[in-house]
Amino acid sequence: MANADREERPERPAESDGTAHLFRALGKQLKVLREAAGLSQKELGAAVHCGEDLVSAMERGVRTPQPDFLERADELLGAGGVLRAAKEEVREALARSRTRHPDWFRDYARVEAEAVAIHEYSNQAVPGLLQTEGYARAVFSQRRPLLDEVTIEKRVVDRLARHQLFERWPAPTMTYVLEEVVLQRPLGGRSSHREQLQRLLRVGLMRTVTLQIMPTDREEHPSMDASFTMLTPRGQQQSAYTEAYGHARLITDPEEVRVFSERYGIMRSQALNPRESLTLIEKMLGEL
């Protein structure tokens, strides 16, 4: 599945048990403190400016709480420094996580982490940075050959960890063009499909994100090949990334990158505008 499976192929051993234990322990502490404060996950998320699903994932230990989140949550929940005290360990764990990717993906992961702009076209699946936990799990559970449960869980955690880009400030500028058929495919079932469309709505409303849908009935299309991503690291030239049948390419040649940029620009002009795109997603949700 092009672009949707990037970082999750044969790789190095999983992260140390110590790191996993840290995140699980932090999640349990967060849940106890939240419940003691009489707040729901939605209420806590609203108070610290993040989504309910993110709070849920952190409490289950499948998302890494950012140091800034720990600072805000510590004060809001009256934790007396308990959460704040873990900030340095979390920073070290995040630094280690940047080297956990397999060799073939590490260059892309480095460029993505440093990018000031990310532009992505997807024609097969919701891009990894936009996937919900349920959608990601469906992607990995259905792959052939079948993956064991431990591998599936690790790959879901690794995918969700990349979502931290949305919490960075200043955040990178992100634009997406998704084929309409991507939104019509109910991977994981009705509930997973609904959650995924709801996440697309939330992300599409972010000031740093522009989301556009390419209708299936368009009679012209400049890029009938694989999905691709264009990234601009701070102070560096734009690069492009594409993947087909497991063969990944990080492209830095200016002329090749120009071709992707030209195609992407044409697609953005042919796709629904951002408001129309969100209206279409709302319509799909209403029909579920």
Image (tube, grey):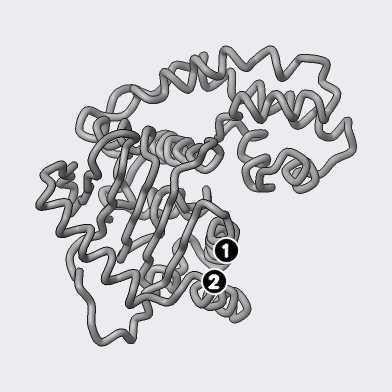
Q: Which residue is mark 1?
A: 201
Three-letter amino acid code of the residue under disc 2:
Leu
- Nearer to the camera, 186 or 115: 115
**Residue at the extreme front:** 235
> In the picture shown, does residue 143 fall above or below 196?
above
Question: For residue 266, which quarter of the picture?
Answer: bottom left
User: Can residue 10 be seen from the camera position used here?
Assistant: no
Image side of residue 188 versus residue 48, left or right:
left
The reply to whether dot 1 and dot 2 touch (C-beta < 8 Å) is: yes
Secondary structure beneath dot 2 equals helix
| In the image: residue 287, left or right of residue 219 | right
Amino acid marked by disc 1: Leu
Q: Residue at x 31, y 43 (%)?
A: 232
Give whichever of discs 1 and 2 has the lower sequence position.
Answer: 1
Q: Quadrant of the C terminus?
A: bottom right
Q: Quadrant of residue 239?
A: top left
Compare residues 252 and 137 and report the one nearer the observer.
252
Q: Which residue bears the numbered disc 2?
A: 278
- Label 1 sits on a secondary structure element that is helix
Q: What residue is rendered at 56% in x and 76% in y?
A: 279
104, above or below 274, in the image: above
Label 1 crowd (10 A; few <14 / some 14-19 / many >=20): some
Quarter of the figure with the N terminus: bottom left
